[in-house]
Image (spheres, helix red, strand yellow):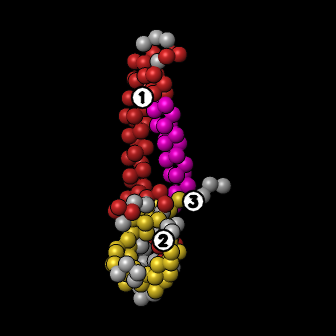
Amino acid sequence: MAKQVMLTNEGLLKLNNELDNLISVKRKEVSEKIKVALSFGDLSENSEYDEAKNEQAKVEARIAEIEAILKNAKIIEDEIIDTDSIHVGSKVRIFEVAYDEENVYHIVGSTEADPKENRISDESPIGKAILGHKAGDTVDAETPAGVVKIKILEIL
């Protein structure tokens, strides 16, 4: 059985839009590139054809990947997210003691993680460490840089 994937409504919309674009736009573009490359003749030395077929394989692989994610997705409804404890979908304000740094993170499933946007996975070291905890708790997160002490300031 495939692993269940946690998605926010925003993540679901993003994946559906990407899938729609891949199916309705990218597939046609790649198909056209293959037709043009075939018109050049001899396929044994036709780099345009090889590139177009590689691009087609990537597009089809991504379509299959997104379809599998959507098939196994569990949607986290924003309205039912409580602020008593941290779980996927929570937004939290934390204080990283070692770095003397405060951050706000949105805990999301692994497919939506984007550290640049402060969207961290529930499977990341910090995400895993704070799941289930409450505001006021202090936890230790096992990170590649070592153990980091985290004070949970607020669940937003």
The residue that disc 1 covers is 30
Q: Secondary structure at mark 3?
A: loop
Pinpoint residue 80: horizontal percent, then vertical percent. Answer: 43, 73
Pinpoint residue 54: horizontal percent, then vertical percent. Answer: 49, 31
- Tell me the tag on residue 4: 3
Does residue 152 appear in the picture of this structure?
no
Q: Cα distance, mark 3 to mark 1?
A: 31 Å
Snapshot quadrant of residue 94: bottom left
Examine the structure image and report whether residue 63 is included in the region drawn in magenta.
Answer: yes
- Tell me the tag on residue 145: 2
Q: Cα distance, mark 2 to mark 1?
A: 43 Å
Does residue 128 appear in the picture of this structure?
yes
Snapshot quadrant of residue 151: bottom left
Residue shown at the point (53%, 16%) measured from the top left: 44
Residue shown at the point (34%, 75%) measured from the top left: 103
- Looking at the image, the residue that sits furthest to the front is 145
Which label's residue is closer to the chain start, 2 or 1? 1
Amino acid marked by disc 2: Ala
Query: Could you say which is closer to the camera, residue 141 or residue 16?
Result: 141
Quadrant including the C terminus: bottom left
Crowd rating for badge 1 (residues with CA inside 10 Å; few <14, some 14–19, many 20+): some
Q: Closer to us: mark 3 or mark 1?
A: 1
Amino acid marked by disc 1: Val
Residue shown at the point (39%, 69%) measured from the top left: 106
Examine the structure image and report whether residue 22 is included in the region drawn in magenta.
Answer: no
Pinpoint residue 78: horizontal percent, then vertical percent. Answer: 39, 68
Query: Could you say which is closer to the camera, residue 154 or residue 15?
Result: 154
* Image: magenta residue range: 54-75
